[in-house]
Amino acid sequence: MDNAPSFEDSWKIEIRRGILQYAVLAIVNRHERGIHGYGIARELEEKTDGLLQVKEGTLYPILHRLRKERLLNVHTEKSESGPIRKVYVLTGEGDRVFRQLSILVGDIFEKLEALK
Amino acid sequence: MSDKQIDRDIENYMKRIAKLLPDGFETEDLLEDLRAHIYESFNAKVQKEPTEDKHRLIMEVLQALGTPEEIAEEYGKEKLAEEETSPTDRWIYYTMRLTVAILVIVLASWIVSVISEGAINFALAVVVLLAFALLEWVVRTQQTKDA
């Protein structure tokens, strides 16, 4: 039996990766005082109606990468549920990159629309 | 279902992820984030559905989080992308690590040689410790590739 993903499934996985990083930056950008990982997962699900079908755990390697790229800063706070959680905020560089990417994303969708 | 059983389910899940990732500070950091997320998501579900079976709720939380394999795969991809985008930083990091490792080896060999009043040869101690350090590096590299 052939279990290989269909063309559409592979394409969705590929496009989702890039979009997800942008979506995470966009959500953090909406919260001036920062937002924790669980909040990002919730907002991603609610605002996109689950379109990106993100497994919540896969957000954390992305958040770590964005931190390493110095696009996000982090501070900790005590959560109501017990463990200490990290709160993510955009750095100055993160803000610049997000603005640049927003322009690029707008351009891409505009041009794609024209191709239809 | 008892809270202890819930904690055990969470710990089993965390152990499965830890097994797939290389040892180190970054992995510890990631596991800490995932643990905080699990408790937060679980408590939110319990508050929303207080009469619901807790085992079912924790299973829902873990399912939404993804399988350990999916998380490890994403971790691997991000590491790869990170190395591709910052080769200079990577070389600085490796050079610093190598320098620190050699300093520690020389210092440890000197201390061992002095304490044993020359019974353990300084040069021999340097070679043996260097061999162990190399072996550890090879094992770690393999673990990272496997993850």
Image: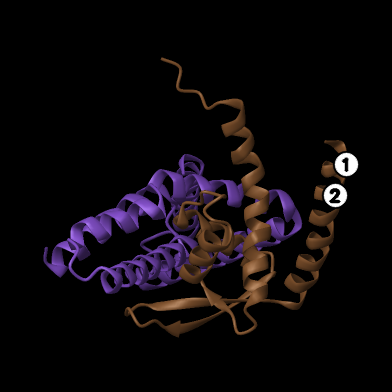
Chain colours: A brown, B purple
Residue nearest the viewer, comparing B14 with B125: B14
Q: Picture coordinates of residue B101 (x, y %)?
A: 54, 62
Horizontal side of residue B43 vs B86, given as left or right: left
Q: CA distance from mark 2 to mark 1?
A: 6 Å
Asked which quadrant contains residue A80, the reply is: bottom left
Q: Residue furthest left?
A: B2
What's the residue type where badge 1 is placed?
A: Ala
Residue at 69 percent of width and 70 percent of height: A70
Horizontal side of residue A66 vs B109, given as left or right: right
Horizontal side of residue A55 vs B85, given as left or right: left
Residue picked out by circle 1: A114
Residue picked out by circle 2: A110
* Placement of B93 over or under A108, stated as above or below: below
What's the residue type where badge 2 is placed?
A: Glu
Q: Counting other residues with Cα less than 10 Å from the Cα at mark 1, is it few (<14), some (14-19), or many (20 or more)?
A: few
Residue nearest the viewer, comparing B48 with A57: B48
Residue nearest the viewer, comparing A38 with A46: A46
Asked which quadrant contains residue A66, the reply is: bottom right
Residue at 62 percent of width and 78 percent of height: A31
Numbered badge on residue B45: none
Is residue A116 among what the camera can see?
Answer: yes
Residue at 62 percent of width and 46 percent of height: A16
Do callouts 2 and 1 mark residues in contact (Cβ within 8 Å)? yes
Residue nearest the viewer, comparing B40 with B8: B40
Asked which quadrant contains residue B51, the reply is: bottom left
Is residue B102 among what the camera can see?
Answer: no
Q: Secondary structure at mark 2?
A: helix
